Image (tube, grey):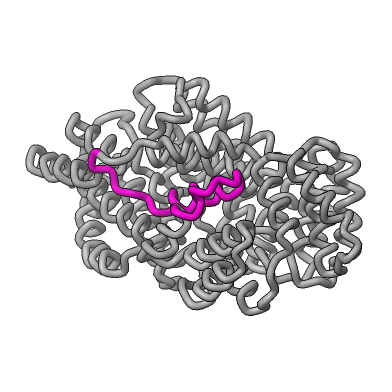
Amino acid sequence: MPRLFLFFFVFFALVAAPSFDANAGGGYHYRFDQTNLEAMTALSQLRLDDARLLINRAMKEDPGNNIPFWLQNYADFIEVIVTENEDQFKQFENNRETCIERLSKGDESNPYYSYCLAEVNLQNALARAKFREYITALREVNRSYSMLTRLRIDHPDFKPALISLGFLHTLIGSVPARYQWAVKILGFNGNVKEGIAEMHKAMKWTEASQDRSFYDLQCLFFMSLIYLNADSDRTHAVDFMNDYMTKRQLQADQLEPLQAYALAGIALRTGQNRMALRMLLNRKQGDGRLPIPYLDYMTGQALLADGDDRAEDFLFRYASGFKGRNFIKAAWQRLAWFHLLKGNPSGYRRSMALAGSKGNLDVDADKAAQRDFENNLTPNPLLLRARLLSDGGYYDRAQKVLQVYFDDGARSDYFDLEAHYRQARIFDDSGETFAAIAAYQKVFAAGKNDKRYFAANSALKLGAIYERLGRHDMAALWYKRVQELDFSEYKNSITQKARAGYERTK
């Protein structure tokens, strides 16, 4: 499961503020008093120790209130997801039944009764998925989805359910075709258009009142993930990022870690590398905040694209110091790239050897690093530099590097496919649409039987271009072609995006 999809659950209900305070009926009640609100703020800033002290105080001040138990589960869940520590996961599992039992005795007439139970089930599911307990995780997702769907029917004005379901509907609509049988068996319903529309309604609702600011961070995460994974037009993501920061008067060098995670994620994926660096290098740290190791990995990537030697320190810190599971192989590979671009072939080989022996194979980036290690094929340094510059939004510099490659008379057919793909990306990202169409079509024709991702992503990009041009017939055709290809690199993320595109345009 992509890292972005793991992190969004941290905020699935973390940042919820009250619409009312109900104590009617039997069972425990749901009250958002000042202590609980302070705890929620501390959690959103990853000040977990402060949050736990506040949660314990809230339990003593109002023993009949279920909100502190819900927040306690969040604090434990955040730590599990951020650190990927197996011992903490086991403790989290041990505490699960106590939390569920307490929340199950709440006031059923209050929408927070179903909401809290649904969100705890989602937290449990994501924690289990992180540690590969997929069957149990699927049951808990199913349970949560059913609760949220019923809640939306019974309490249509309860906005937190709209936020959660909007995102879930988008995810359901993005499931690749080969897994649609599972979606149908589980009774899940949803599509990308429906989910995006619901999320836009939710975002407008959060902006209408300062009292709803806690929901705002949740919407930030959901919307950033939607734009990066289910929207073909990256200008939408950039517009969303700029609009979000302007309305809230946020400065790129004054972000909380979780704001930096969401917004820098958009910046990195949309060629805004310098903006991403401002967000990541100047994010708020210390003061009891739980470090997010993955932000070091993101920073290392951004510095590598920028040609900054500090990339080595950040990538090495993550690769050698992170005790979790994901992106370790990818970090070693990017450290190898750093050495290769510095003209240090022995450093490249050492880092690639570690990419082959360390880490796990749960995410696409780690799988790609392992494949490259096993293939034992050193990247062409010019194409690697062009790739990094292009990804960072440095298109003129990338074009100059790429031209040096094309001027070399000793090129190989193997690397030429990648070179033409890099050229197509530069055309596309710099706004030369019709040149990009021709270049992508050339890559698709030459590489559709190649196991690498170049042809598949070219088809995906062609679908996105035609969708932007309003040619939904052509867009659907190219999105469908992605799903018909047999390729191995980045297959999960590319096919998921193609599925979402096909659902929008078919």
Residue 241, placed above or below residue 1:
above
Q: Picture quarter containing residue 189? A: bottom right
Tell me: 257 left or right of 75: right
Q: Picture quarter containing residue 175? A: bottom right
Q: Residue at x 68, y 58 (%)?
A: 494
* Residue 225 visible in rendering: yes
Q: Residue at x 75, y 45 (%)?
A: 398
Residue 143 in the image: x percent, y percent?
Answer: 42, 60
Residue 123 in the image: x percent, y percent?
Answer: 37, 56
* Residue 506 visible in rendering: no
Q: Residue at x 44, y 41 (%)?
A: 161
Q: Picture quarter containing residue 66? A: top left
The main secondary structure of the magenta stretch is: helix
Name the residue nearer the viewer: 418 or 484: 418
Q: Residue at x 56, y 58 (%)?
A: 188
Tell me: 301 left or right of 316: right
Q: Which residues are magenta?
A: 287-313
Name the residue nearer the viewer: 492 or 72: 492
Name the residue nearer the viewer: 503 or 229: 229
